[in-house]
Amino acid sequence: MRQNLTGYEEMRLRGEAVNFAVVEATDHELVLGGASVYEVALDQGRAAAGSWLAPHARGHGLATRTLNLLVGWVFDHLELERLELTCGPDNIASQRVAERCGFTHEGVLRSHLPFRGSRRDSVLFSLLPGERL
C-alpha cells in the first residue's frame, strides 16, 4: 500500500495525476472511496476522471456528489477544455452518474483495456467546461 501511495505522490508532483480519498465528514478515518484525475495532458487541455465507492457507501448519491466536486476542482484549477470518463459497458451505475453530472455519451472504445486476462470495451463520456451542471 505504501508503495502505491508513493507512486500517487510522484505522479502528482509530475503533474500527471492527482488522487483524492472520499471520507466520512465526521470520521476522516472511514474511507468511503476515491476519485482521480489522470492522463493529464495540459498541453492538449484534457484529462480523464474516475471514481469508486465501497459497497457500503453506494446508493446515497455520494458518487454523483464526488464526481461533481472532482469536475469543479478540475475545471477551476487545471484550466482544461475536456474531461473524459470511461467505464465498462456493464457498469450502468457509473454511466448514470456520468450523465447526472452532465457528461455526454460519445460511444464505445472497442477492446480498450486489458481486463481479467482478456480485453474489455469501454464506454466513453466527455464533459466540456461550459457543460458543468
Image: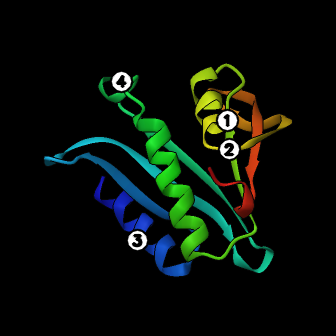
Q: CA distance from mark 1 to mark 4?
A: 21 Å
Q: Is residue 33 left or right of 79 when viewed as pictured?
A: left
Residue position for label 3: 9
Going by the numbered disc 1, the residue's amino acid type is: Glu
Near-viewer residue (30 or 98) = 98
Q: Earlier in the sequence, mark 1 or mark 3?
A: 3
Going by the numbered disc 4, the residue's amino acid type is: Pro
Q: Which disc number belongs to residue 102?
A: 2
Residue position for label 1: 99
Going by the numbered disc 2, the residue's amino acid type is: Gly
Q: CA distance from mark 2 to mark 3?
A: 29 Å
Q: Which disc number belongs to residue 55?
A: 4
Q: Which disc number belongs to residue 58?
A: none
Going by the numbered disc 3, the residue's amino acid type is: Glu
Marker count (numbered): 4
Crowding around mark 2 (Cα neighbors within 10 Å: few <14, some 14 to 19, many 20+) is some
Q: Is residue 113 left or right of 106 when viewed as pictured?
A: left
Q: Dots 1 and 3: beta carbons under 8 Å?
A: no
Q: Nearer the viewer, mark 3 or mark 4?
A: 4
Q: CA distance from mark 3 to mark 4?
A: 26 Å
Q: Is residue 64 left or right of 56 when viewed as pictured?
A: right
Crowding around mark 4 (Cα neighbors within 10 Å: few <14, some 14 to 19, many 20+) is few
Q: Position of residue 52 (x, y in %)?
A: 46, 38
The residue drawn where x is 26% and y is 47% is 23
Q: Is residue 127 left or right of 58 when viewed as pictured?
A: right
Q: CA distance from mark 1 to mark 3?
A: 30 Å
Q: CA distance from mark 2 to mark 4?
A: 24 Å
What is the secondary structure assignment of the residue under circle 3?
Answer: helix
